[in-house]
Image (cartoon, grey):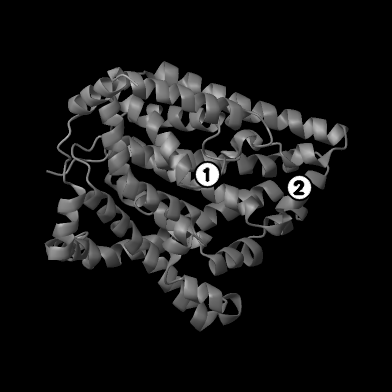
Amino acid sequence: MKTERNSSIELLRLVAMLMIVARHYITLNPFMGQFSTQPLTFTTMFYEWIVSLGKIGVAIFFIISAWYLCEETHPTIRKGLKRAWILEREVLFYSLGLMLVFVVFQPDLISKKTIALSFIPTISGSYWWYVTAYALFLVLSPYLTVGLRAIGKQAHAALCALLLIIWGLISGMLPANMLQLIGTNFIDFLYLYILITFYRWYLNNWGRKIAWIFVTAGTALIIGSFIALQYLGYYLHVDALRQNAHYLSNTCVMLPVILVGFGMVLLAESKFYVNRIINYLAGTAFGIYLIQCYPPMRDLLWIHWFNSGRDYTLPHPILRAIISILLIFFGCMATDCIRKTIFSLTADRRPGAWFDICATFIESRKVVQRLRSILLTVPNETPESVSAAMTKNQTKPV
């Protein structure tokens, strides 16, 4: 029997995607680099603050996935590859579908390179960094899950502490990207997954009070540093300070971002209810991301139609920003509802069926079976015999 999804979590998934769309309204426009040279007004602060929302949304989006993925009883490479394939169906639907739309109706906005890369969007990593990083994470996650289970609670706790010091404090709180660890790749997801699995397996009982502390502390750090650097940069006439005003929220693994994202997931998880409309619409969240980040569509939306740099100079810029973000969000949502309808009649009738057929065929080949037997052959030596042999060698006279 299929378990009903918690609508609190699904609603949070939509909120996270709205945060990402809001960030893209600013960051995917060429005017982004000029905000630090504008007079310090409430409008400027609002436009810059929007940027901080996006990476919180990314953290929430991934944490929700990891929250349930780590509870799988028997993770295998085949399950990981199957999840990546199911993800890839939607990715290819939009990369090829949008490519055809632009080739037919807006050929001046799409290049030959874009057309070629539309056939391999995930492998190329040129269109959607999250897709490439997450697909790679899905393939590796079964090994990571088994390995983390094997090392036990004590070693897992030590690993989390070490990562929080290195990523969370040294590289995640200090400026200039200390240790060069902060980026946008699957390593970020491995780091988050290690933290989430420890909580889910060994704690999983923090209440709403702690969740609110996390959200409040993370928000205070992000907003406090943002305001401080904005004012310092403005009054000291140092544009670099204003350009880096949101460095504490510049990636999904910054400690304040993790605090806010994790706290919001805890709050959502603490309240269970089922709303079929919310659950249905939450299934469009990934599609919203894919649509508005496809390169030609990105240029069309964020430069030609909803230009934040242009809106900033017109009357009521804040209202224009809010309306633009909501129009893109709900417009992409409506588009993906069409995709969901098409998939419900075709691909989703038996999700992953073609993958299972191909995987079973490949696994039945003699060469694959032979390779597996070679790789899975266990040496005769046991850990005890190896240890005894080493001790014996150490006691031999030289």
Please tell me which of labels 2 and 1 falls first in the chain. Answer: 1
Q: Residue at x 77, y 54 (%)?
A: 313
User: Amino acid type of disc 1?
Assistant: Met
Please say if the residues under marks 2 and 1 sit with CB atoms less than 8 Å apart.
Answer: no
User: Amino acid type of disc 2?
Assistant: Phe
Is there any visible trace of residue 70 in the rendered image? Answer: no
Q: Classify mark 1: residues with Cα within 10 Å, few (<14), some (14-19) or many (20+).
A: many
Depth check, front residue: 346 or 130: 130
Q: Classify mark 2: residues with Cα within 10 Å, few (<14), some (14-19) or many (20+).
A: some
Depth check, front residue: 15 or 292: 292
* Mark linked to residue 35: 2
SS at badge 1: helix
Q: Residue at x 24, y 65 (%)?
A: 347
Q: How far apart are marks 2 and 1 (CA)?
A: 19 Å
Depth check, front residue: 149 or 3: 149
- Residue 209's place in the image compared with 353, above or below, is above
Question: Going by the picture, which residue comes out furthest to the front?
Answer: 398
SS at badge 2: helix
Is there any visible trace of residue 341 in the rendered image? Answer: yes
Position in image of residue 294 (x %, y %): 51, 64
Position in image of residue 225 (x %, y %): 68, 28
Quadrant of the image occupied by residue 152? top left
Q: Residue at x 38, y 47 (%)?
A: 137
- Horizontal relation, residue 24 to residue 134: left or right: right
- Horizontal relation, residue 124 to residue 173: left or right: left
**Residue at the spot of label 1:** 19
Q: Quarter of the image for the N terminus: give it.
A: top left
Q: Residue at x 68, y 44 (%)?
A: 47
- Horizontal relation, residue 370 to residue 167: left or right: left
Quadrant of the image occupied by residue 194? top left
- Horizontal relation, residue 205 to residue 74: left or right: right
- Residue 373's place in the image compared with 255, above or below, is below
